[in-house]
Amino acid sequence: MAERYNYLIIGGGIAGTTAAETIRSKDGIGSIALVEAEPNFLYSRVALPDFTAGNIPADKLMLRRLADYESAKIDLYLGERVESLDLGATEARTASGKVFIFSKVLLAGGGYPRFWPQEEGAPSRVARLRTMQDARRMQELIEKYREVEWMNPQLGIEEKRRGKVLVVGGGLNALDLVDIFYNAGFEVTVILRKRRFWEERLDEKGSAIFEDLWKSRGIEIIFESEVKVIADTPDGARVLTDKGDKIIADIVAVGVGLERNLELAKSCALMYGAGIRVNEFMETSRKNVWAVGDAVEYSDLYSGTDKLSGSWSESFMQGKVAGHNMALNEGGEDKRVQFDTVFSYAVTHLKNQIALVGRAEEGANIEAVARFREMQGGYSRFFLKNGIMIGAILLNGQEYLGTVMRLIREKRDLSMHKNNLTSPDFDLSKI
């Protein structure tokens, strides 16, 4: 028998949960269903590295309890994956056979780790970090391989050695993986497809800072190479690269990016590119259908370019915007709110603070300028489009964060300030 709801939220992460709670704050009567494929209540994905490393307990990871959904009168369906969506019939079906009839629907399904075919060669040794289940499995692998018995061929006796991990990938997720395994005492090797780290974001000196940071800690880096084949053996995962390098690793930790959940959007003929296309109100190309979170592509107000969602703060704010607009009655278009947020993401890597702000990557008509504070280990790179700041990457430069956010929002022409931007002695807050 079908369940009928005024609002159907597909995806129970921070975007979907925030949308559901915002709807309830605006509409105290309408029925809300929140359908989540994972078996867990809302938890902090950004805290998964700390949880995996044992820095925080599981209860600190959790952001909601059953009582929170019950008090908000949100019907929660965990472990239910929506596999079909019919907008004409306003009907959604889950893999288990549940049927939902809705008036308005929000797509907040996010994404999943990109398929990596090499994993099939040694699945028991490959680790990801996207979900709580991934984190728990990684903890088990760390405990299993932190110390490994091996036969010393020179002495002919069994000894114990440190565990070895190969980290595949060069994005933010890979930085988290390096942190986790290095701090757990593993020998760490990183393999990157590109000629240097964060090639699209950093200049050569900026990349060298990260590379020196790794090398100073004994972390090996292999550039311009890819894993070709993995085989599981008693000695570990035997990895062969496309350049013929042979590596033995106890664990292969993979951070090769995210695939957006676009299947439902495609089946409903919604507009999409790299993600589901939405306007500033989080509305899709079909009436009464909204989308938020990692699966969304939107026009960035500050860079003037299309952008994929990719941060916790973006998803949270999109959930608030979508929830407000979904709760409006027919004809309430003039009361809609728009999504107006400057992207920001901060992470600590090997005790260094890294922050990405706005559109912090190279591209057409984008000029990048950098400043260094070598004594403090500081590096900043600012991205300008037609003289206007659209993004920045800050290494040990957290004190600039507020100023950078302001300059991006103000859309001021900074052409006359390029020397100030590059000077480590100039106070950016004076601009």
Image: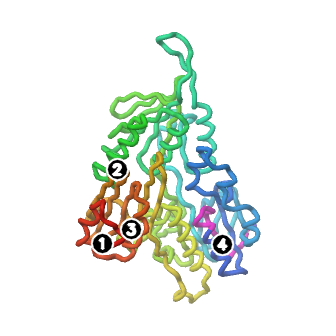
The Cα–Cα distance between marks 2 and 3, rounded to whole angstroms, is 22 Å
For residue 21, the mark is 4
Say if the magenta span includes residue 6: yes
Q: Which residues are magenta?
A: 2-17
Cα separation, mark 4 vs mark 2, equals 47 Å
Q: Position of residue 102 (x, y in %)?
A: 65, 74
Quadrant for residue 407, please give it.
bottom left
- State yes or no: discs 4 and 2 in contact (Cβ < 8 Å): no
Q: Amino acid at mark 4?
A: Glu
Q: Are marks 2 and 3 in contact (CB under 8 Å)?
A: no
User: Which is nearer the N-term, disc 2 or disc 3?
Assistant: 2
Q: Amino acid at mark 2?
A: Met
Q: Residue 10: give x, y in percent of width and height.
A: 61, 65
Q: Nearer the viewer, mark 2 or mark 3?
A: 2
Quick check: is 3 in the magenta stretch?
Answer: yes
The residue tagged with tag 3: helix, strand or loop? helix
**Residue at (61%, 69%) from the top-left corner?**
18
Amino acid on which disc 3 is placed: Val
